[in-house]
Amino acid sequence: MAELENPNVMPNLITFLSSLLQEVAESNDANCRSQAQKISVFHGLSRPTISIQNYLDRIHKFANCSPSCFIVAYVYLDRFSQKQPSLPIDSFNVHRLLITSVMVAAKFMDDMCYNNAYYAKVGGINTMEMNLLEVDFLFGLGFELHVTPNTFHAYYSYLQRQMNIAESSLSLGRSLKLQLCFNEEDSSHQKQQLAV
């Protein structure tokens, strides 16, 4: 999509994705207090001190992957959450899921990409952990990495609409409740939050 090449679009997309993931993580943090949750390799012992916004900015700055990788990473996160409902995105795993989803998207989408050791440095983890995260993420996705043009367009269009609504909402001083889940079969938005 040519719009993704516009230098003004990526910062807005990064900001919106980070706020979306922040809301999902906070919502799932609140829900997980009352429910038992499966612990995985994606969970840290404590919440990272870097914000999701700063972490995603860091990945964008140093990963040098194509803009479409961030949309595909978003698709992967959604698929992962749908296939792994016992592992909701929360503040203990969102950073590791982000770096892994972007790395896998870059490897699948881009002609040239960095190796796992480089992504590990960008993500603030060691290479062995990055390798393990990648394998678990791929198995969690069932190795379903292909994103059809229709699915890509549906996710991108949704993000564009939500960014436009958010910008309008911010200018009017209203709050916006963000949603994240799609049904890829019919590309229609579901009235549910990711992995709630």
Image (cartoon, rainbow, N blue to C red):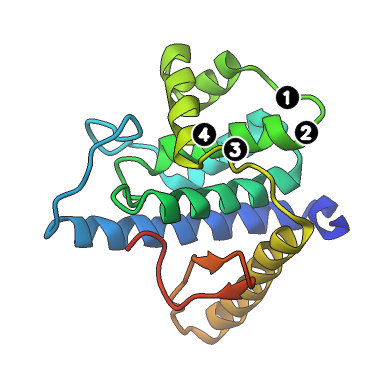
Q: Nearer the viewer, mark 3 or mark 4?
A: 4
Q: Residue at x 54, y 25 (%)?
A: 122
Q: Residues within 10 Å of mark 4 (few under 14, many from 20)?
A: some
Q: Amino acid at mark 2?
A: Asp
Whole-Å distance between the Cαs marked 2 and 3?
A: 11 Å
Q: Callout 3 environment at 10 Å: few (<14), some (14 to 19), or many (20+)?
A: many
Q: Which residue is mark 1?
A: 113
Image coords of residue 55 (percent x, y): 49, 39
In the picture, measured across the screen, residue 91 lies left or right of residue 186, that is left
Label 2: state its secondary structure.
loop
Q: What residue would you read off at disc 2?
A: 110
Q: CA distance from mark 1 to mark 4?
A: 17 Å
Mark 3 secondary-structure assignment: helix
**Which quadrant of the figure has residue 117?**
top right
Between the residue at mark 3 and the residue at mark 4, the CA separation in whole angstroms equals 12 Å
Query: Dot 4 corresponds to which residue?
Result: 138
Q: Earlier in the sequence, mark 3 or mark 4?
A: 3
Compared with 7, 190 (above or below) is below
Residue 91 horizontal/vertical position (percent):
31, 47
Label pair 1/3, CB-CB below 8 angstroms: no
| Residue matched to label 3 | 102
Callout 1 crowding tier (Cα within 10 Å): few <14, some 14–19, many ≥20? some
Q: Earlier in the sequence, mark 1 or mark 3?
A: 3
Q: CA distance from mark 1 to mark 3?
A: 11 Å
Locate residue 38: give its quadrant: top left
Q: Position of residue 136 (x, y in %)?
A: 43, 30
Name the residue located 36 percent from the left edge and 59 percent from the top edge. Answer: 195
Q: Secondary structure at mark 1?
A: loop
Total marks in image? 4
Q: Earlier along the polypeptide chain: callout 1 or callout 4?
A: 1
Q: Is residue 115 above or below residue 45?
A: above
